[in-house]
Structure formats: C-alpha cells, structure tokens
Amino acid sequence: MYQELYDHIRRYVPLSAEEESVLASNLSHRVLKKKEHLLTAGQVCHANYFIVKGCLRLYIMTESGHEQTVQFAIENWWMSDYNTLGTSRITHVNIQSVENTEIVVLDATLQEYVFTRIPQLERYFRLVLQRAYAAAIMRAQYMLEMREEERYRHFSSAFPGFIQRIPQYMLASYLGFTPEFLSKIRAKKDA
C-alpha cells in the first residue's frame, strides 16, 4: 500500500524492510474526491501528506475574497502547512484536491516517534524540504522578474503535465493573473 512512498524515500536515504514496517504502522491512507478539502482555514494542521496519485493545491483567500493558489503538489510530492504543523495554532491556508487524489498521511503526533525509530527520515525530510524551498524561491524570482506571458510560457515548458491537469482559473491564480488574461495568452498561442 505504501510502496510509492518507500520508493521515494529510497531515492534519498536507505530504508530496510523492518523500517518499512515501523513506518507503515504509523501511516494512514486516504482517498479524496475532486475538489474535496483536506484542510481549511481556521482548522489545525495535524499531518504531512504524501501524494500517491492525483494533485493537491494549497491556497489562501485574499481580503477581496479571491482564491490565491500558492502551491501545487502531484505524485511523489509532500504537502502540509509547515507554518502550523505540529502546533495548536490555526491555519490560514486551505488544501484541496484538484482531482481525485490518493494520499499517505503522516500524523504530526507520530512523526517524532518515527524519527527516533528511523533517524535517516529526518535527513530525507530535510532534503525534500530543501528542494521545495529552492523551488519556492525560484517561483518568487519568476513572479518578480518575468512579465505575465513569460511566466506562463516558462511554466508551460517546465511543467507541461500541469497545463493539462490544472483548471485554468487555478493556474491563472498560481501564476498571478486573471483567468481572462490566461485565455488571451492561450488564444495568442493558438492563433
């Protein structure tokens, strides 16, 4: 049931059969329907989520009432609200499935126990989070330095699979412009 996660972990650190067993006993599995919320603003974030199949998005609601997508996660990516994970503070973000999604859940209350039993998992999470942080910095740089059309062209060439999977309004929100502007860019491309 957790083979995809084990394979992903082994890309970074070794994992024995015994460690797989320890990890499995501290994980749960969940299936989300398209557009189902995993976390909503006002709740407490209690877990890390590994995407086995499907796509999640993390978004905030702006003061004007618009959804601003901050992050997407697809197969073999993790998602959580790391600002509040493992605390009793409420979250200000929402995590929603973009399509039918299957996830593995690592509860924050069990995470420390798992780390003591499988110490190399701390290294695994550090390496995964370093990559995620570098991607976030790169996205911020693109948002500041590139014009809207350049951002779309860059994103569509770097992540062609996303373009087909993500609804236009979510993609536009992530790239920092309106769905109408995205339609114009796409129409220009097809012309």
Image: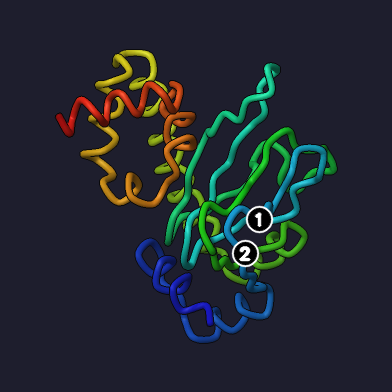
**To which residue does mark 1 refer?**
36
Residue at the left extreme, as displayed: 191
Question: What SS does tag 2 mark?
Answer: strand
Residue 4 rendering spot, x and y as whole percentages: 44, 73
10 Å crowding of disc 1: few (<14), some (14-19), many (20+): some
Observer-nearest residue: 165 or 124? 165
Q: Residue at x 21, y 39 (%)?
A: 157
Q: Residue at x 72, y 57 (%)?
A: 108
- 173 lies above or below 52: above
In the image, which disc is placed on residue 32? Answer: 2
- 69 lies above or below 121: above
In the image, which disc is placed on residue 66? Answer: none
- 21 lies above or below 75: below
Residue 121 rendering spot, x and y as whole percentages: 53, 62
Indicate left or right for 129 with 183 as reference: right
Q: Residue at x 44, y 55 (%)?
A: 74
Residue 188 rendering spot, x and y as whole percentages: 20, 25
Kind of residue at badge 1: Glu
* Dot 2 and dot 1 residues touching (CB under 8 Å): yes
Kind of residue at badge 2: Leu
